[in-house]
Image: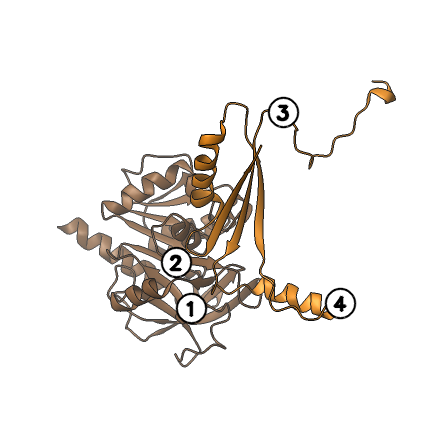
Chain colours: A orange, B brown
Amino acid sequence: MAIEDFEWTSSYKLSDGASELRAKVYVTLKPGVLDPQGKAIHHAVESLGFNGIEDIRQGKFFEIELGASVDEGSAREQVERMASEVLANPVIENARVEIEA
Amino acid sequence: MKFGVVVFPGSNCDHDAYHVVSKHVGQPVDFIWHKETNLSSYDAVIIPGGFSYGDYLRAGALARFSPVMNSISEFARRGRFVLGICNGFQILCEAGLLPGALVRNRELHFICDHVFVRVETADTPYTHELQQGATLHLPVAHAEGNYTCGDETLDTLQREDRIVFRYCDSQGQTSERANSNGSRDFIAGICNRERNILGLMPHPERACEDLLGSSDGSPIFRSLTATLASLQER
């Protein structure tokens, strides 16, 4: 392969197929569930000199590429089910789903 | 009576459990690969400790989707016995076979230690050879052992006498100091309503021989074996 043919693609770069949808899922701890990691991050941030921070809660973020066969109508329903059954544990976490064209 | 020890990718206390059942309890035991779905030849299944699926997503979250888990739900529904230790307890909670969840330890550290737990009820197939209030000295090794649940679940667990073990000091007193992972209401182990499923964070299977520093885990296996023996006699 000639060097000019080489195209570097980051594994973090998601495909940009025209008709495909992307879902974003934000998983956060329910209010009242203790978040020791968020607390430790809060202390670290304060030690850097950032003041006036009330609270930091740590969560998880998922980007999901949907194939062209998934239409917008069923995408939300499918991803919400995925979020409540796998991505989040409903005992301790909430999930919020966004669908992007 | 026959025991099975479930093996997920990443289980690492499976051999300890197998050893205890085969050598200490002296009963036949098989390893059960997580893709197995036929549990008909078993009377009791142990879900061992470890890091199933590398603890990806949440501890125990992915093991729940292994084929064997549907069979374990059915196995438990038929009144057979399921003992989840450490990661096994996390898997049982994720699978909804026990209520609540196990989250990151309060101080964030992985805790590898010997702790005391108090037997809160002798009215289970796993603790009937123990006295309520007895203390056991058992090893723990976990990063996500901090038991949490909603108020309603806690109330149900208390009302139905389903809190089986609580962390305590050597004198049997519960305290936040003795509750090193920060568990709600000092909970170290619980059972289901039917009392045939037990989940606990400490490792009784690593404490069945004096050579290992404690044999306090032994009565748990003795109780279960006696339960199975009495059922066979019927």
Mark pair 4, 2: CA separation: 36 Å
In contact (CB < 8 Å): disc 4 and disc 2: no
Mark pair 1, 3: CA separation: 49 Å
Mark pair 1, 2: CA separation: 10 Å
Using a 10 Å C-alpha cutoff, classify the residue at mark 2 as few (fewer than 14 neighbours), some (14 to 19) or many (20 or more).
many
**Residue that numbered label 3 is attached to:** A18
Location of residue B107 in the rendering, given as x and y in whole percent from the top left corner: 57, 68
Q: Which mark is residue A48?
A: 4
| Residue B122 makes an appearance in the image | no
Location of residue B86 in the rendering, given as x and y in whole percent from the top left corner: 45, 56
* Amino acid at pointer 1: Arg
Q: Nearer the viewer, mark 2 or mark 3?
A: 3
| Residue B81 makes an appearance in the image | yes
Residue B201 falls left or right of residue B192:
right
Label 4: chain letter:
A
In the displayed image of the protein, which residue is found farthest to the left?
B234
* Amino acid at pointer 4: Leu
Mark pair 4, 3: CA separation: 43 Å
